[in-house]
């Protein structure tokens, strides 16, 4: 595959002056420097060279989605600015093949006094669309943004959500082979974030090359094939996205393994004394197989087979993996009220943004201060591999929640007041 | 618009040459910047284009009262009414000075955009001139009404020179403004100093007094100021006076020098702009 972006030995340095001044000078300072003349050597030494980026080398292939992650100040933004031709590198060179568009911000150049329609034209033009192109895509852009009604209202009257939606809509319809995107997904409500992520995924699938910088690990994970971790202006690692994210979050592979052994060991110690729900023989299960949930154990403190209201609880799920090609799974437990079977809670690694490697065979769920009214509850277990359902047992069993003084008042709501106990305070 | 389908190379420490081809590719953006500024300007004001007319009109009125009636400064000729004389001068001066100040502030004013997206940095200064031209056009309409009101038949030479003189004034304002725009980034003092500079320049330019008020041997130096060339050429033409072609040529040459120096300084600083913005 041919590299579309070739970055060779890019470095960028800034002079930071220690005079407690903003980065721009005033004439006074420079005059003072001139007057000091030969004796001004001291003020030179007060300056320090700061390397925002140092010896950056990497390539992005055609059609690839490449993520850049790192803490604040690691040099991500500087790198994007160099690639977007906004700042000049101090050393090195970059080659980009094909038409580039960069979105370092949503709504660059939006003017509050202009109407939505006018801003679409100005913003579109500034990010590199021709007037004809904007006119052609205008309806599409407006439909995507969902602000049709307010097109002829100055954007200063827009809510921040509307503003961002319109701005993203323009950018998303930009036609270019290489897209450089910074953090733009970190805006708007959850629903719009999903929509914009889906749009980016579809852009990526069209075979475009995308360079993506974000703090949202989920987005990077979902969008990027490969990623790069920057630390203090240097490349720490370039690898498959999940590996890079693990490294970034400080979850090194070894510590993960150690943690696993600990869980399994502690489980083995008590395994003999556990009261569990055996699911290995259940026939009424759906999914394609390849993975089979065998045991579910509820545990609160030392008592197993149940949870205790208001105390920390654990749910252990054991499963057998027969399809070795499955690498990562999503595991979910649904909790239903009884006898009416209303779903009252959904527990899954997916909503935590966590991955579970399929080979582990045992997953432990920790619940803080179990917020359930005493009584019996039903549960359902579910496992899939990115949409491919492996095992699904509806109404797999029941468990009991024992009474305990949740509110430390000796009083609990009547069972017919609903299953959930919220932690709250009241003031007057 | 941007057919950068070929390979883009970013090389450290390379100053870009003046790239007219790229500017041509971005011509729509020049239009959009100008369009935005004009829209915003007229949206925020009640009078809108009225200001373009009111400013020189009120100024001409005030100068007629104080300069002409009180200080007895004339037009250099008995058949030229002072208000028309002053209005014509102010119309060009306003065009020149407003272009100069908008160009000078065009980079700082667009800092947000410059910091986030690439386009030739010459575009905001170029577009900044447009607003002054639009204002000038409105002011011209009133000028013709004044001519009619005072029953003055303008010289054809003057009419023919109106547009070239405007171009001269605008190119000069653009060139000097370009230098200030780049300097403004590094030294924000420019922003505060500029109004005073413009005010001083107003009095050394024959806007509201005839050039003949300056001693003859100094007149040629006055033409080093491009605004002098632009304004006195139009005045001489409109009011049937003899044209000082030597002086006008000097103004044209000095404008060219300003343009070259302005562009060179701008191109040299351009790459470092975002470091200061």
Image (tube, helix red, strand yellow):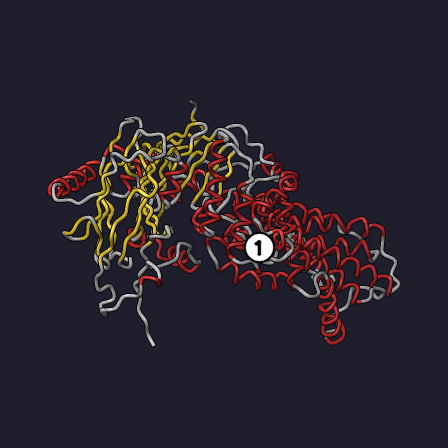
Mark 1 lies on a secondary structure that is: loop
| Position of residue A293 measured from the top left corner of the image (x, y, whole percent) | 27, 36
Q: Who is closer to the viewer here, A250 or B55?
A: A250
Please tell me in which quadrant of the rendered image residue B152 appears.
bottom right
Q: Residue at x 41, y 37 (%)?
A: A223
* Camera-nearest residue between A50 and A413: A413
Q: Chain of mark 1?
A: A
Q: Residue at x 24, y 55 (%)?
A: A401
Which one is in front, A342 or A292?
Answer: A342
* Left or right of A192 in this view: B140: right
- Residue A6: give x, y in percent of width and height: 41, 29
Query: Dividing the picture into quarters, in which one does residue A237 lie?
Result: top left
Task: Say whether residue A171 is left or right of residue A72.
Answer: right
Classify the position of the N terminus of chain B by image quarter: top right
State the image coordinates of residue A124 (x, y, percent, origin top left). 58, 44
What residue occupies the far top of the structure in this picture?
Answer: A1
Where B49 sits versus B121, above or below?
below
Give the left or right position of residue A185, taking residue A263 as reference. right
The extreme front residue here reads: A339
Q: Residues within 10 Å of mark 1 (few under 14, many from 20)?
A: some
Whether residue B232 is situated above or below residue B196 in the rendered picture: above
Give residue A148's position: percent from left, percent from top.
Answer: 62, 51
Q: Which residue is mark 1?
A: A111
Residue A414 seen anywhere in this rendered image of the structure:
yes
| Residue at 72% over, 74% down | B66
């Amino acid at each position: 595959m041919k590299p579309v972006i070739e970055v060779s030995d890019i470095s960028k340095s800034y002079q930071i002056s220690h005079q407690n001044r903003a980065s721009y000078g005033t004439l006074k300072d420079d005059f003072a420097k001139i007057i000091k003349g030969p004796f001004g050597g001291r003020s030179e030494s007060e300056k320090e060279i700061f390397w925002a980026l140092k010896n950056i080398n990497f390539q992005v292939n055609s059609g690839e989605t490449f993520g850049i992650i790192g803490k604040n100040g690691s040099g991500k933004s500087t790198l994007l600015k160099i690639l977007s031709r906004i700042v000049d590198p101090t050393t090195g060179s970059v080659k980009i093949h094909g038409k580039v568009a960069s979105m370092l911000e949503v709504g660059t150049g939006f003017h509050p006094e202009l109407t939505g329609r006018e801003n679409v034209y100005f913003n579109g033009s500034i990010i590199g669309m021709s007037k004809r192109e904007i006119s052609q895509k205008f309806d599409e852009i407006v439909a995507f943004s969902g602000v049709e009604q307010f097109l002829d209202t100055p954007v200063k009257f827009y809510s921040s959500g509307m503003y961002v939606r319109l701005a993203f809509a323009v950018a998303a319809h930009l036609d270019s082979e290489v897209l450089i995107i910074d953090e733009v997904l970190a805006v708007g409500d959850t629903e719009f974030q999903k929509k914009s992520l889906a749009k980016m995924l579809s852009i990526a699938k069209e075979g475009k090359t995308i360079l993506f910088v974000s703090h949202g690990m989920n987005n990077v994970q979902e969008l990027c094939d490969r990623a790069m971790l920057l630390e203090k202006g240097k490349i720490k690692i370039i690898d498959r996205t999940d590996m890079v994210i693990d490294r970034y979050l400080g979850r090194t592979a070894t510590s993960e393994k150690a943690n696993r052994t600990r869980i399994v060991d502690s489980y083995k110690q008590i395994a003999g004394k556990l009261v569990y729900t055996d699911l290995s023989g259940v026939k009424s299960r759906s999914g394609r197989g390849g993975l089979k949930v065998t045991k579910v154990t509820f545990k609160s403190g030392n008592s197993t087979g149940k949870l205790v209201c208001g105390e920390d609880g654990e749910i252990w799920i054991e499963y057998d993996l027969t399809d070795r090609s499955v690498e990562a799974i999503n595991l979910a437990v649904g909790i239903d009220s009884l006898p009416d079977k209303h779903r009252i809670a959904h527990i899954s690694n997916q909503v935590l943004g966590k991955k579970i490697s399929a080979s582990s065979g045992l997953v432990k769920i920790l619940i803080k201060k179990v917020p359930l009214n005493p009584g019996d509850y039903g549960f359902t277990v579910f496992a899939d591999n990115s949409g491919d359902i492996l095992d699904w047992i509806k109404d797999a069993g029941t468990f009991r929640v024992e009474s305990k003084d949740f509110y430390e008042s000796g009083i609990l709501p009547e069972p017919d007041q609903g299953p959930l106990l919220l932690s709250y305070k009241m003031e007057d | 618009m941007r057919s950068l389908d070929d390979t883009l190379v970013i090389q450290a420490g390379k100053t870009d040459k003046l790239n007219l081809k790229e500017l041509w590719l971005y011509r729509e953006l020049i239009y959009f910047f100008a369009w935005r500024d004009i829209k915003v300007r007229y949206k925020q004001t009640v009078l809108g284009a009225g200001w373009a007319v009111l400013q020189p009109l009120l100024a001409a009125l005030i100068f007629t009262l104080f300069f002409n009636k009180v200080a007895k400064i004339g037009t250099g000729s008995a058949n030229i009414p002072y208000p028309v004389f002053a209005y014509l001068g102010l119309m060009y001066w306003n065009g020149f000075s407003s272009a100069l100040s908008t160009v000078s502030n065009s980079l700082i004013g667009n800092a947000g955009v410059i910091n986030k997206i690439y386009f030739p940095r010459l575009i905001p200064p170029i577009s900044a001139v447009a607003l002054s031209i639009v204002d000038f056009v409105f002011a011209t309409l009133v000028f013709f009404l004044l001519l009619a009101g005072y029953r003055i038949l303008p010289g054809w030479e003057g009419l023919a020179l109106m547009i070239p003189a405007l171009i001269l004034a605008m190119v000069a304002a653009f060139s000097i403004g370009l230098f200030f725009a780049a300097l403004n980034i590094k030294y924000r003092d420019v922003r505060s100093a500029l109004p005073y500079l413009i005010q001083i320049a107003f009095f050394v330019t024959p806007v509201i007094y005839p050039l003949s008020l300056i001693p003859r041997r100094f007149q040629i130096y006055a033409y080093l100021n491009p605004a002098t060339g632009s304004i006195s050429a139009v005045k001489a033409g409109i009011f049937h006076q003899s044209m000082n072609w030597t002086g006008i040529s000097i103004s044209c040459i000095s404008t060219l020098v300003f343009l070259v120096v302005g562009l060179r300084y701008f191109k040299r600083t351009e790459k470092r702009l975002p470091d200061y913005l």
